[in-house]
Image (spheres, helix red, strand yellow):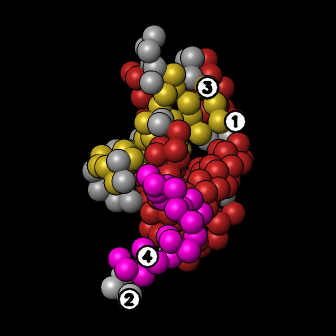
């Protein structure tokens, strides 16, 4: 199993679209990141866990799911980096490969030392753009395909049957 741990605010600060959105509405930027990571999870099959620092959201630590993506807000006085490091250790086993998405250079080296693979914010953005293109291509292919008839029909006969089906004949 592959698990992607995402440093939420680090990615928001690094991706141009999310950074711009954050200036107007931090909550909307978080929601947009969650949506994008849900697409990533659906396309790649990775389990995605997004970790946000508590200092932007007051209160106790919270954990919930949205779009099947796990979202964690750290405890007060706990950084996302600390939580990600703990999780990388806890989740790492012989059947699991941990990937950590952050552009924090120190964090990348710490988790790399724990056996996790690092992915910079730019690499993740490039991967997301590729995935977006692949999804668009799949949607286009699917919408262009005509349902195959079990009986070979000429275009004229298929049109007659279609009008008949719609009650226009």
Q: Residue at x 69, y 63 (%)?
A: 16
**Place of residue 51 in the rendered image (x, y in percent of width and height, measured from the top left):** 44, 45
Quarter holding the C terminus is bottom left
Query: Which residue does the numbered mark 3 point to in the structure image?
Result: 117
Mark carried by residue 151: none
Q: Does the image show residue 77?
A: no
**Place of residue 1 in the rendered image (x, y in percent of width and height, measured from the top left):** 45, 24
Is label 3 in a helix, a strand or a loop?
Answer: strand
Q: Nearer the viewer, mark 1 or mark 4?
A: 4
Query: Which residue does the numbered mark 2 point to in the structure image?
Result: 168
**Place of residue 48 in the rendered image (x, y in percent of width and height, measured from the top left):** 45, 40
Which one is in front, 129 or 57? 129
Magenta stretch, residue numbers: 143-165
Q: Nearer the viewer, mark 3 or mark 1?
A: 3
Query: Which residue does the numbered mark 4 point to in the structure image?
Result: 162
Q: Nearer the viewer, mark 3 or mark 2?
A: 2
Q: Residue at x 45, y 11 (%)?
A: 94
């Amino acid at each position: 199993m592959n698990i992607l741990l995402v440093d939420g605010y680090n990615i928001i600060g690094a991706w141009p679209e999310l950074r711009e959105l954050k200036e107007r509405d931090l909550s909307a930027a978080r929601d947009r990141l969650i949506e994008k990571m849900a697409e990533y999870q659906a396309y790649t099959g990775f389990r995605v866990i997004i970790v946000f620092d508590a200092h932007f959201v007051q209160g106790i630590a919270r954990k919930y799911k949205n779009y099947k993506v796990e979202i964690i807000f750290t405890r007060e006085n706990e950084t996302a980096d600390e939580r990600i490091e703990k999780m990388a250790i806890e989740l790492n086993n012989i059947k699991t490969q941990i990937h950590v998405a952050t552009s924090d250079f120190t964090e990348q080296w710490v988790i790399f030392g724990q056996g996790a693979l690092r992915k910079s914010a730019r690499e993740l953005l490039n991967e997301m753009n590729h995935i977006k293109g692949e999804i668009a291509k799949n949607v286009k292919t699917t919408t262009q395909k005509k349902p195959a008839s079990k009986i070979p029909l000429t275009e004229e006969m298929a049109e007659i049957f279609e009008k008949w089906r719609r009650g226009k004949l």
